[in-house]
Amino acid sequence: MPGHSVLQLPVAPLEEWVRARTAHYDGGFVSSDPRFGHAHITALGPFDPDPSATDLAVVADLAAATPPIRVRLADLAQFPNGIIHLVPDPGDRLRDLTARLVAAFPCWPPYGGEFGDDVQPHLTVDAASAEVDLASTAALLAEVVPVDVVLDRLQLAWWESGACHVVEEWRLGAG
């Protein structure tokens, strides 16, 4: 699978856990970039793999105009495709950020338009299988969540096996 860009909000308190889980599934996606947010909430993805300076300036302006976002990550849920995730509460400011990014970049609908307007902010933690379900993931996360976090950075991250890294990063509310 070719690489792709994502605008994401790193979640530092869960970084070690998600990085280890990523290594469990596919070590190629463990980044050597210390800024890279393995634990993240996607703001918009996929995103332009080769954004112009103007595009980057628009993202910088949106980040500067967005105050840091405080959320609690406690509840696990599962999408129909088997992705097990934490649900940020509240999620309204995250949906608002995604909506503003989509308004600025209509050629890049969230998840390629696969889910229409039903964008659900989440932090992926696992994938259901014969050995993994909500209960087993909850048990693994028992000493890690709930966690309260202030999301204060927006990253343009490149996701590709063997090459995951942060392309650009902006502080939220820096305007």
Image (spheres, grey):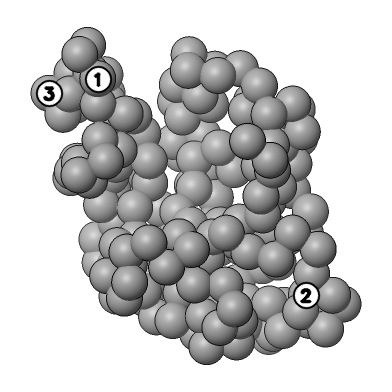
Q: Amino acid at mark 1?
A: Ser
- Can see residue 71? no
Contact between marks 2 and 1 (CB within 8 A): the answer is: no
Disc 3 element: helix
Disc 1 element: loop
C-alpha separation, residue under disc 2 versus residue under disc 3: 41 Å
Q: Residues within 10 Å of mark 3 (few under 14, many from 20)?
A: few
Residue picked out by circle 1: 129
Dot in front, 1 or 3: 1
Residue picked out by circle 2: 56
Q: Could you say where residue 7 lies in the image, as x and y percent from the top left?
A: 60, 61
Dot in front, 2 or 1: 1
- Relative horizontal placement of residue 32, taking residue 130 as reference (left or right): right
Residue at figure coordinates x 20%, y 13% from the top left: 130
C-alpha separation, residue under disc 2 versus residue under disc 1: 38 Å
Residue at figure coordinates x 54%, y 50% from the top left: 10
Residue 135: numbered disc: 3
C-alpha separation, residue under disc 1 versus residue under disc 3: 12 Å
Q: Amino acid at mark 2?
A: Leu
* Foreground of the two, 145 or 160: 160
